[in-house]
């Protein structure tokens, strides 16, 4: 090696070393922060609009003001309830065929609430994703249950009810073709009848593990496995068989939605995975892996920040956010259990640090049912979302490019 070559080599090394060093830092950062997606995903900033928000939903003027306030605070998604307690929130031919009162909830001037929510949201540039809240769950006194008692599943002792956050409920049999057709027809009706951006299912698109001992399911399991269902509710094969059946239905449901609206967002808002799978037979991680879900918002309603953090750093969340927009459901408060803006801010910031979006339960508790004055609450949310995070609407041709 002559002098010129040696000096050139030294200059090359001096140039190369900083580049290699910077590359090692970036690589280390990426792998030491696995929760940060390799590709930017649209950031979810949503809020559920529940039956508790019905006074606002029914009044066009109040709803316009509410959506406008969300837009000014840089929210980008609303999840209005459309299926709750065995009843729909819109005029439904499917519900009418099932002998269910088709239009229990309507606007103050008789208008279609869901049509109004979608229109108002789109005018302000927000996504409207109706929320199929109750899934397979229904109150035992609902018209749905009274008229279709043969659609229910049961526990091993023959009982049919369980206690939930909504009180005493029964469960439609998710393995029964008639139930699957009813749910599919409702969902397809929603995405066909309205200019919605998608549909959302939550933790009730599942079945508590105590259920599945009805005659139809027992016969199906026996036919397919050549043995009777075990008495052990936690038997791994029995859990998996039922969970796989629900997954198969979700695949059919996804196909039905996409056939009507290819760009529609199929959103899921479950509990954390271990709980969802073991206790509710909801294998949502497998749904994501099979491309049955376009968005996931995991509910983490915990006041303790450490416990909240432990849930959002789980490996399955890290895996999911590499594929689809992923957020965390945060409790903004209840009428009988208000939540401080300080707690909300701390949880949102922890989620943001992990590259996660957020959705709040529920609208009224954002600033109306709260321990602080509305102005202070709104300032708190403005600090969390100082700039817009745009999510293209389902009808926007740019959506496919953003995915």
Image: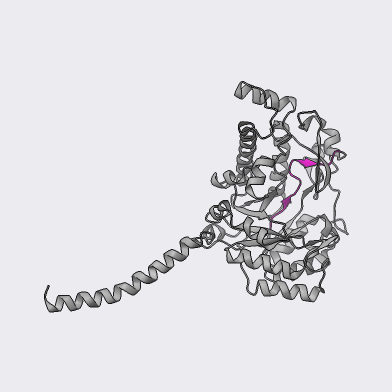
Residue 55: image location, x then y, percent: 86, 61
Quarter of the view holding residue 257: top right
Q: Quadrant of the C terminus?
A: bottom right
Q: How many numbered badges does the structure rendering display?
A: 0
Residue 324, relative to residue 347: is it above or below? above
Q: Residue furthest left?
A: 2
Q: Nearer the viewer, residue 110 or 305?
A: 305
Residue 35 vs residue 345: left or right?
left
In which quadrant is the N terminus drawn? Answer: bottom left
Q: Compared to 387, does 331 lie above or below?
A: above
**Res 113 seen here:** yes
State the image coordinates of residue 133 (x, y, percent, origin top left).
75, 49
Residue 253: where, in percent of width, then height? Answer: 64, 41
- Residue 334, picture quadrant: bottom right
Is 133 covered by the magenta stretch? yes
Seen from the viewer's position, the closer of residues 275 and 142 is 275
Magenta part of the protein: which range? 128-140
Per the image, is 341 magenta? no
> Looking at the magenta stretch, what is its main secondary structure?
loop
Of residues 363 and 283, which is closer to you in this image? Answer: 283
Query: Residue 28 appears in which quarter of the rendering?
Result: bottom left
Which residue is nearer to you in this view: 270 or 80? 270
Q: Position of residue 390 (x, y in %)?
A: 61, 66
Answer yes or no: is residue 125 visible.
no
Q: Residue at x 74, y 40 (%)?
A: 136
| Rendered position, 299 above or below 145 | below
Image color mode: one colour
């Amino acid at each position: 090696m002559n002098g010129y070559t040696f000096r050139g080599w030294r200059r090359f090394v001096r140039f190369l070393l900083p580049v290699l060093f910077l590359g090692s830092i970036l690589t280390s950062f990426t792998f030491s922060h696995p929760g940060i997606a390799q590709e930017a995903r649209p950031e979810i900033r949503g809020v559920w609009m529940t039956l508790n928000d019905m006074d606002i939903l029914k009044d066009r003027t109040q709803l316009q003001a509410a959506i406008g306030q969300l837009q000014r605070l840089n929210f980008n998604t609303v999840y209005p309830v459309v299926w709750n307690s065995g009843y729909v929130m819109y005029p439904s031919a499917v519900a009418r065929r099932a002998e269910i009162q088709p239009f229990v909830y309507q606007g103050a001037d008789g208008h279609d609430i869901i049509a109004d929510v979608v229109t108002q949201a789109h005018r302000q540039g927000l996504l409207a994703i109706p929320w199929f809240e109750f899934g397979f769950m229904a109150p035992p006194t609902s018209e749905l249950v009274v008229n279709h008692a043969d659609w229910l599943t049961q526990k091993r002792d023959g009982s049919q009810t369980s206690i939930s956050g909504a009180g005493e409920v029964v469960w439609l049999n998710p393995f029964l073709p008639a139930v699957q057709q009813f749910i599919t027809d409702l969902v397809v009706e929603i995405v066909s009848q309205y200019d919605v951006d998608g549909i959302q299912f939550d933790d009730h698109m599942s079945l508590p593990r105590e259920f599945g001992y009805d005659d139809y399911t027992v016969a199906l399991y026996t036919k397919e496995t050549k043995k009777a269902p075990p008495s052990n509710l936690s038997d791994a094969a029995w859990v998996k068989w039922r969970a796989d059946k629900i997954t198969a239905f979700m695949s059919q449901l996804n196909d039905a939605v996409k056939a009507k609206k290819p760009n529609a967002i199929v959103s899921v808002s479950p509990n954390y995975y271990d709980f969802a799978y073991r206790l509710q037979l909801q294998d949502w991680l497998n749904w994501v892996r099979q491309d049955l879900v376009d968005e996931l918002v995991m509910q983490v309603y915990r006041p303790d920040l450490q416990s909240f953090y432990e849930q959002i750093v789980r490996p399955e969340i890290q895996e999911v956010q590499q594929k689809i927009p992923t957020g965390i459901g945060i409790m903004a408060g209840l009428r009988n259990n208000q939540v401080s803006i300080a707690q909300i801010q701390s949880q949102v910031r922890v989620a943001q640090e992990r590259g996660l979006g957020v959705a709040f339960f529920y609208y009224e508790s954002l600033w109306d049912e709260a321990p602080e004055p509305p102005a202070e609450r709104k300032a708190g949310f403005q600090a969390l979302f100082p700039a817009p995070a745009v999510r293209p609407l389902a009808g926007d041709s740019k959506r496919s490019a953003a995915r």
